[in-house]
Image: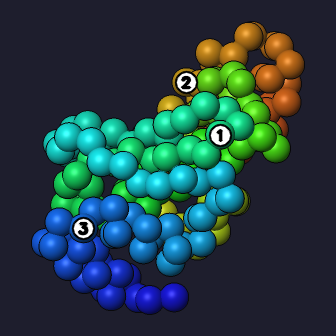
Amino acid sequence: MKSKAEIVQLLQTYHELGQTEQAALFLIDEFELNQPNFARILLREKADPSYILFTAEGEIGEPISIRIPENAFEFQFELMINLLAHEMVHVIQKSKLYSIQIREEREWQAYYEMCFHKLFPKVPNASKGHRLFFANKALEYYNRMPKDGELQQKYANQKVEIERFIASLSK
């Protein structure tokens, strides 16, 4: 695996050449995020630092595309790779194999991954502030699940992990 400095330099070069899709594909390969259900990278309008939107698009059971801002690689590398990993979790979830229908469950799993990198262990941690944001978003989606329902019971142990994670980051 390349060093962070090498990765950042390559991303900067791709960005300067207007090759945002290629930069994203490079990260997907470098951090072993690729999935059989992944179709392609698509671009959307430029983002600003307060709102950077990545989405996984396509019907469950069909190949899924990830749409990213055309200026994604103007932002912090660790945040961008975590956002790509989040969307790649959605690619997995929307595969024929898993077909996870409930949005709250999909988002819970994706934000949990951004905190602990269990599916994608090569993904580096984002900043402490971003990790706190991810963990709180995970709890937000957990709390949107039916109270004491099947999904909350299924993820109860992971919820405890998230709460401990928040506490450790808040010190």
Residue extending farthest to the top is: 147
Amino acid beneath label 1: Glu
Quadrant in which residue 22 is drawn? bottom left
What percent of the width, then of the height, locates residue 43? 30, 48
What percent of the width, then of the height, locates residue 170? 47, 45
Disc 1 and disc 3: Cα gap in Å? Answer: 26 Å
- Mark 2 touches mark 3? (CB < 8 Å): no
Amino acid beneath label 3: Gln
Residue name at image x 44 percent, y 89 percent: 2
Disc 2 and disc 3: Cα gap in Å? Answer: 35 Å
Mark number, residue 140:
2
Between disc 2 and disc 3, whose residue precedes? 3
Estimate how packed mark 1 is, as few (under 14), some (14 to 19) or many (20 or more) residues with alpha carbons within 10 Å: some
At numbered mark 1, what does the secondary structure look like: helix, strand or loop?
loop
Label 3 belongs to which residue? 19
Does 148 sit left or right of 36 as displayed?
right
Estimate how packed mark 3 is, as few (under 14), some (14 to 19) or many (20 or more) residues with alpha carbons within 10 Å: some
- Between 159 and 13, which is closer to the camera in this rendering? 13
Disc 1 and disc 2: Cα gap in Å? Answer: 28 Å
Label 1 belongs to which residue? 62
On screen, 147 above or below 164?
A: above
At numbered mark 2, what does the secondary structure look like: helix, strand or loop?
helix
Would residue 40 be visible to someone looking at this image?
A: yes
Mark number, residue 98:
none
